[in-house]
Image (cartoon, rainbow, N blue to C red):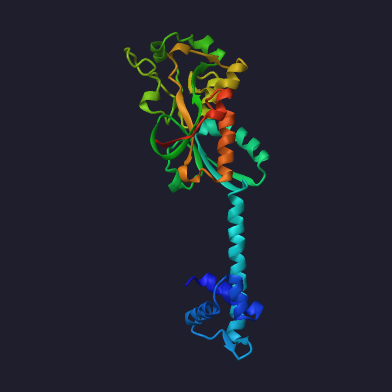
Amino acid sequence: MDKLQSMAVFVDVVTRSSFTAAAEAHDISAPMVGKHIRFLEQQLGARLLTRTTRRQHLTEIGSHYVERCRQILEDVRSAESQAAELHSVARGTLRIAAPVSFGSGPLSSAITDYLAAYPEVSVELTLNNRVEDLVAAGYDAAIRIGYLQDSGFTARELQPYRMLICAAPAYLERAGTPLKPADLARHECLGFTHWRRTMCWQLAPHEPQEPAPSRFVADNGQALLTAALNGFGIIMQPEILLADAVAAGRLVPLLDEWLPAPRPMHLLYPHDRRNVPKLTTFADFIVERFGAAQPQQKNKQRPRKTRPT
C-alpha cells in the first residue's frame, strides 16, 4: 500500500473521529480504512488506535505518530505546490556557461537586463573556453561557438561569431601596414592560447605562408586587447571585443578580405527542460537580443535539436 495515502487516511480518521467519515473523504470503504490503519501498524510494529464499540482512541504512540504524519503531509503538499509554481512562473537559479569574450561583454549586459525583467530568477555565469558536458557539469544552458552535430540538445541560433584583425595607429606608424597575410611574418602578432590550428594566424591556407610570430600569447582576449592598445602588435579577436576600440579610432581594422569566416553561435540547453519557465524565458530573451534571424523572422524561428562538437 502507499504509505503516504495510509498516513492521510489515518490523519482523517483521527481528525473526524470516524472510520466512516474518513472513508467518505477518501472515496473508499470503511473496511479499506481499516486496512490502511493495519498497514501502518504493521510497518511500525505498534498499535495506533484502540477501538471500543462506540469510538476509537489514540494510543500513546498513535498520538505522537499522527502529529508527525500531519507535518509530513503538509511538507509534501508544500513541495508539490512549489514544484507547480516553478512550472508556471520564472523562478529559481540558472547556471549558464559561455566563452570568455562573449560572456564577459554582451552576454553579461543582457543577463542584467533579463534579471531586471524577471526578479525571481538568479543567474550563475561561468566563463571558460572549454567545451564541457552540460548535464554532467550541472549547467542549465551554454553558449557554443562552432558547428554542431545532431543530438538531444535544443539549439537556438544566434548571430554569427565574427573576427577582426586590428592594430593601434601607433604600431602601424612604427611597423607599417600589412596588406596581405604573408606580410604578417614581419609583424608582432598576438597569439591566443585556445586557438585551434585552423584558427591561428594562417589566414591563407592555399598559399605559401610563414606562420606569423607570436611573442606574446595569452588565454584571455582582454589581455591581448590591452597589448594591442599599447601599440605592441596586431590582434585577431572577436568583433564584440574589439568593436568599441575600433569605433573610437584606437584600433584600425586590417586585412578585411582575409578575415576568417564567421562561425555559427548557438544557445544550447537540454531538450527535456524546454518547458521550465526560468529557462524558456531566458532562452527567448537571449534569442531576441542576439538572434540570427531578421526581426520580422524571429517569431517564426523554431529551435532544433543538436549536440555540441
- Examine the rendered structure and indicate whether residue 183 appears above or below residue 34: above
Pick whichever, 132 or 3, lies toward us.
3
Residue 25 percent location from the top left of the image: 61, 71
Pick whichever, 233 or 239, lies toward us.
239
Pick whichever, 143 or 164, lies toward us.
143
**Residue located at (57% from left, 21% from top):** 243
Residue 235 percent location from the top left of the image: 49, 20
Residue 172 percent location from the top left of the image: 52, 11
How many numbered markers are drawn?
0
Pick whichever, 85 or 14, lies toward us.
14
Left or right of residue 214, residue 274 in this image: right
- Examine the rendered structure and indicate whether residue 143 appears above or below residue 200: below
Examine the rendering and report whether any part of residue 297 can be seen. Answer: yes
Left or right of residue 216, residue 18 in this image: right
Left or right of residue 125, residue 215 in this image: left
Residue 298 percent location from the top left of the image: 56, 27
- Examine the rendered structure and indicate whether residue 177 appears above or below residue 89: above
Q: Picture quarter containing residue 81?
A: bottom right
Examine the rendering and report whether any part of residue 124 can be seen. Answer: no
- Examine the rendered structure and indicate whether residue 134 appears above or below residue 237: below
**Residue located at (56% from left, 40% from top):** 280
Q: Identify the image quadrant of the C terminus.
A: top left
